[in-house]
Amino acid sequence: MATMGSPSHQLRKDVGHLKYTDLLPYNKDGYAATREFLLKVTELLVEFVKDTHDRNKKILDFHHPAEMLRLLDLDVPDRGLPLQQLLDDCSKTLQYQVKTGHPRFFNQLSCGLDLISMTGEWLTATANTNMFTYEIAPVFILMEHVVLEKMRDIIGFRGGDSILAPGGSISNLYAFLAARHKLFPGYKEKGIHSIAGQLVMFTSDQCHYSVKSCAAVCGLGTDNCVEVPSDERGRMIPEQLEKLILERKARGHVPFFVNATAGTTVLGAFDPLEPIADICHKYRLWLHVDAAWGGGLLLSKKHRHPRLTGIERADSVTWNPHKLMGTLLQCSTVHFKEDGLLISCNQMSAEYLFMQDKLYDVRYDTGDKVIQCGRHNDIFKLWLQWRAKGTEGFEKHMDRLMELAAYMTRKIKSMPDKYHLIVEPEMVNVSFWYVPSRLRGMAHTAEREKILGEITPVLKGRMMQAGTLMVGYQPLDERPNFFRNIISSAAVTEVDVDFLLAELERLGHDL
Ligand code: HLD
């Protein structure tokens, strides 16, 4: 990163001293200064893009919060600051920000910095519109229609409806609300007492926590979000699902919703959709597939089956382009087989926004389909990215990520003394323990796992201090802390996987 005071961080003095009031719109003659300021900011951003891809640069410069507060001037002052100070603020912000697009950032399901999508986000910020009416977002609303229809088509839904939501958790909530509305349409007006009996939902013990949150938020209580056991690779066991449905029915409860996960958060496991869909059909339950993580594999002929086979039998599907597809944060979609449910479930007909006697076809005012009012424009960055890559570009990306995950798995297996693979990956999550020198001769017992679980966060701490690598860790069920490595970035190559394994050894061999 260039240091403060480098040319790309320095406005000409006469501009640097100016205040926001010297720019548009406060100063009607301020275009020249406005232009100079914006171009300098853009230069800074482009420099950050360069640094992000530089393997000689660190991913982060870690400081504890108290120290970070000393390093940064976060005060929001009474008197506004000049433009040069604002530019310095931007520079410092990026200096201490984690570079999530760095080729050695393996920490989250959303990694990478897709530059076309980023360009889209820049345009989105500049267009600065709200997505509730066609009136103020005509192009973007039509883009939503086209892209979401394409995604439904890829899922295998003919017709149907979709919406972009702020994150996968809220997407899952939309599915829950639509399911309840479909089965109990009186709930919207009459409330909880219109449903005779205790509603119950089912999901695997590996699901994303947002599914349980639906039960807490929507009046079921988390005790009525039943956790279905999963097998040794993290996949829901359908026989257990049926058993638990029957148990709840025998208690007079009302099972109504099953969530199947396509790509679990930690292990990347795929619940078997066909047998789960059979059970939902048999007991007339709504089937939601949370493919927030695994949805991207729908774009790969090679990897779609058998993982996502049967997804077209679902009633609703969550799919987050900001994960595997690399669209910039955030971009989350939820899709419904049946058209009309979203509007019927969520419509409040606010008269100041959704007038029915407008100039145009008001079905394009999608804002009344959602429980939010304001909605961010998350479509342009996906649309532009899709234009650049084409569907085949996404397919190549998926196949490449899977290839790299397989490469990493092979490497780990080839060094069993140093790395202990936890499960054979179904996706790009590679779960393993790093084994330091002193534990290499020891049999792999519960005692050794306990020690490995203690070592893992210490090694993660060293990683953060070194700033050279970021890999996540967590415990899972009876397994103590282990590393979960995610390969979800177009920046990653075999060289980076080799680096990752060598860096763990460098930082952790003496633990
Ligand atoms: O819920 C999660 C969402 C994301 C993400 O959008 O990157 C969990 C994680 O990432 C994660 O990395 O565990």
Image (cartoon, rainbow, N blue to C red):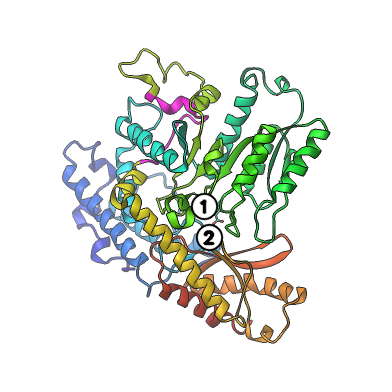
Circle 1 residues within 10 Å: few <14, some 14–19, many ≥20: many
**Relative to 206, residue 24 above or below:** above
Which kind of residue does numbered mark 1 sit on?
A: Gly
Q: Does label 2 or label 1 sit earlier along the sequence?
A: 1
Mark 2 → mark 1, Cα distance in angstroms: 8 Å
Tag 1's secondary structure? helix
Q: Helix or strand or loop: what does disc 2 sit on? A: loop
Circles 2 and 1: CB distance less than 8 Å? yes
Residue on which the image places disc 2: 427
Q: Nearer the viewer, residue 370 or 231?
A: 231
- Which residue was labeled with disc 1? 294
The answer to which of 468 and 264 lies nearer the viewer is: 264
Q: Position of residue 3 (x, y in %)?
A: 32, 68
Q: Is residue 355 left or right of residue 70?
A: left
Q: Residue at x 24, y 36 (%)?
A: 25
Quadrant the C terminus occupies:
bottom right
Q: Residue 350 vs residue 386: left or right? A: right
Give the main secondary structure of the magenta stretch. loop
Question: The N terminus is located in which quarter?
Answer: bottom left
Residue 414 at least partly seen: yes
* Residue at (31, 68) in percent of width and height: 2
